Structure formats: C-alpha cells, structure tokens
Image (spheres, rainbow, N blue to C red):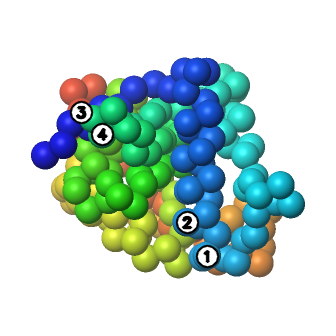
C-alpha cells in the first residue's frame, strides 16, 4: 500500500488545492452540464471559505510526495460537522486512498457528522455508502434533502453518523 498522508492545508498549499479544485469541479461538471467561467475556472467560493472563514478546515492529501486530493470541513464551530467537499484524483482512486483519508479527517473532529452527495454521481453514492458501512457499521442514516435555493435540482443525498474521539464511529 502506498503511503498516504492527510494534513491541514496552509496558505502556502492554497495554489495546489486550487488546482485540485479545478479537477474536482471538472469531474462534477458532467453531471449537470456546468461549464467553466470565461477564464476557464469554476466557482471557487468553497476554496475561499475553507481558507478564510472561521469554522472551516481545508485538508490536503498526499501519496508519497504528490498531492492526490483534498477535503473541506465546515461547521467545526457548530453541533454537526459537515464534510463540505471531498476529492481524490482519478489516478489514486480504487486504491483505498478515499477511505483512509476520510477516516483520518473525520477522526480529527469527533462528534456528529453529515456528508452530502449528488444521487446522479453514482460513484459518489457507492463510495459514501461504503464509507459509512465501513466506518459506522449499521449505525448511520441516509436521507434525501432539497438543494437550498435551487428548486430545479434533484435532491442531494445526506449521510449522518457520529465519530468518536479515537476514530471510532457510531450512529447519532
């Protein structure tokens, strides 16, 4: 198994995270026909929030010395933490990187968690259900919720669970 590390991203890491963000948004663009902005970027409000707002934490994943993904956690100052964005580059998928990194990110912030995903992203549906089963056994729940302020979009899936202080997960 390759060595995979998870660490809090710093301001110096932001350019790397922004490039990974473009890959993430490109992956998602095919699901709903989203086109890039005129300058070739995609919306970056979550990147900005992850690095600038209280209650957020950006994480960067590396395999050996190469960046392979990121996670943005929000609501760290609220009762329920939210895994806002999560991405692993295609070249590192199906090697256990996603499960290892999500386990580590979640274990760093014990308590109730929620993760949203789009039902039309079949790979994400399979991944998050598998992650929930592997991390929480049967002690997790899933529900469909409308996308706020976007009535024309199909509902998102939301998985909920609680992470213990030692990395163990239980239902909330």
- Residue 167: image tag: 3
Determine crowd level at label 2: few under 14, some 14-19, many 20+ residues with C-alpha closer than 10 A. some
Helix, strand or loop at label 2? It is helix
- Residue 27: image tag: 2
Is 128 left, or right, of 78 in this rendering? left
Is 62 left, or right, of 71 in this rendering? left
How many angstroms separate mark 1 from mark 4 (CA)?
27 Å
Query: Which badge, 3 or 2, is on the more N-terminal residue?
Result: 2
- Residue 63: image tag: 4
| Contact? badges 1 and 4 (CB < 8 Å) | no
**Residue 150, how many percent across, how many down?**
77, 68
Helix, strand or loop at label 4? It is strand
Nearer mark to the viewer, of 3 and 1: 1
Relative to the observer, which residue lies in front, 84 or 40? 40
Q: Residue at x 42, y 66 (%)?
A: 124
Helix, strand or loop at label 3? It is loop
How many angstroms separate mark 4 from mark 2 (CA)?
20 Å
How many angstroms separate mark 3 from mark 2 (CA)?
29 Å
**Residue 127, how many percent across, how many down?**
34, 64
Nearer mark to the viewer, of 1 and 4: 4
| Contact? badges 4 and 2 (CB < 8 Å) | no
Relative to the observer, which residue lies in front, 1 or 139? 1
Which of the 4 image quarters holds residue 60?
top left
* Position above or below: 144 against 46: below
* Position above or below: 30 against 46: below
Q: Residue at x 69, y 26 (%)?
A: 53
| Contact? badges 1 and 2 (CB < 8 Å) | yes
> Which residue is most to the left?
1
């Amino acid at each position: 198994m390759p060595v995979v590390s998870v660490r809090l991203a710093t301001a110096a890491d932001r350019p790397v995270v922004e490039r990974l963000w473009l890959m993430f948004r490109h992956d998602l663009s095919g699901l709903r026909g989203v086109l890039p902005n005129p300058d070739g970027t995609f919306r970056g409000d979550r990147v900005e929030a992850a690095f600038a707002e209280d209650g957020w934490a950006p994480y960067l994943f590396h395999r050996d010395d190469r960046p392979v993904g990121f996670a943005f956690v929000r609501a760290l100052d609220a009762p329920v933490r939210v895994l806002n964005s999560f991405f692993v580059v295609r070249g590192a998928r199906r090697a256990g990187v996603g499960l290892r990194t999500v386990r580590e990110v979640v274990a760093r912030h014990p308590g109730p968690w929620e993760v949203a995903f789009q039902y039309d992203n079949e790979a994400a549906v399979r991944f998050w259900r598998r992650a929930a089963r592997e991390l929480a056994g049967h002690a997790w729940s899933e529900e469909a919720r409308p996308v706020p302020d976007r009535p024309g979009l199909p509902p998102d899936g939301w998985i909920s669970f609680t992470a213990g202080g030692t990395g163990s997960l239980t239902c909330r």
